[in-house]
Image (tube, rainbow, N blue to C red):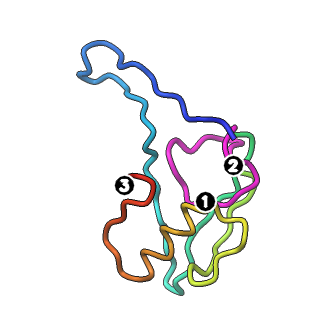
Amino acid sequence: MTSPKSTEPEGDGAGGWYGSFVAPHVLLRREDGRVLMLRRYQTGYADGWLCPPAGRIEPNKASEALWIDPARPPHDVIPHCALALAAILRGEAFGVHGWA
């Protein structure tokens, strides 16, 4: 597993791109309650593991897309993503796992 890289801002920050350790995740949920997961592929981090769409979605960075039951996630969901799914199911609006 590799560490994420931070980048320096371009220009004065107005309209520049910033890198960070935070990747936005999108939880897409069907009417039957299942959520979309992608199997990471050639990303350099957690390849082969499942996670929701996150960060920049690029061609060839996912080898599979599948809908899972968030109450019974597969064993190969990235652990922090599985924790987030459990928190969402409990109705928690905010979590600090890994930040506190």
Q: Earlier in the sequence, mark 3 or mark 1?
A: 1
Q: Residue at x 72, y 65 (%)?
A: 76
Distance from label 2 to label 3 (Cα)?
A: 23 Å
- N-terminal of the two: label 2 or label 3? 2
Residue at the image point whose x is 69% and y is 41% from the top: 1
The residue pinned by badge 1 equals 51
Residue ID for mark 3: 100
Give the residue drawn at x 58%, y 68%: 36
Q: Are marks 2 and 1 in contact (CB under 8 Å)?
A: yes
Residue denoted by label 2 = 46
Q: Nearer the viewer, residue 30 or 43?
A: 43
- Observer-side mark, 2 or 3, equals 3
Q: Secondary structure at mark 2?
A: loop
How far, Cα to Cα, is label 2 from label 1? 9 Å
Residue type highlighted by circle 3? Ala
* Residue 82, image x, y percentages: 57, 68
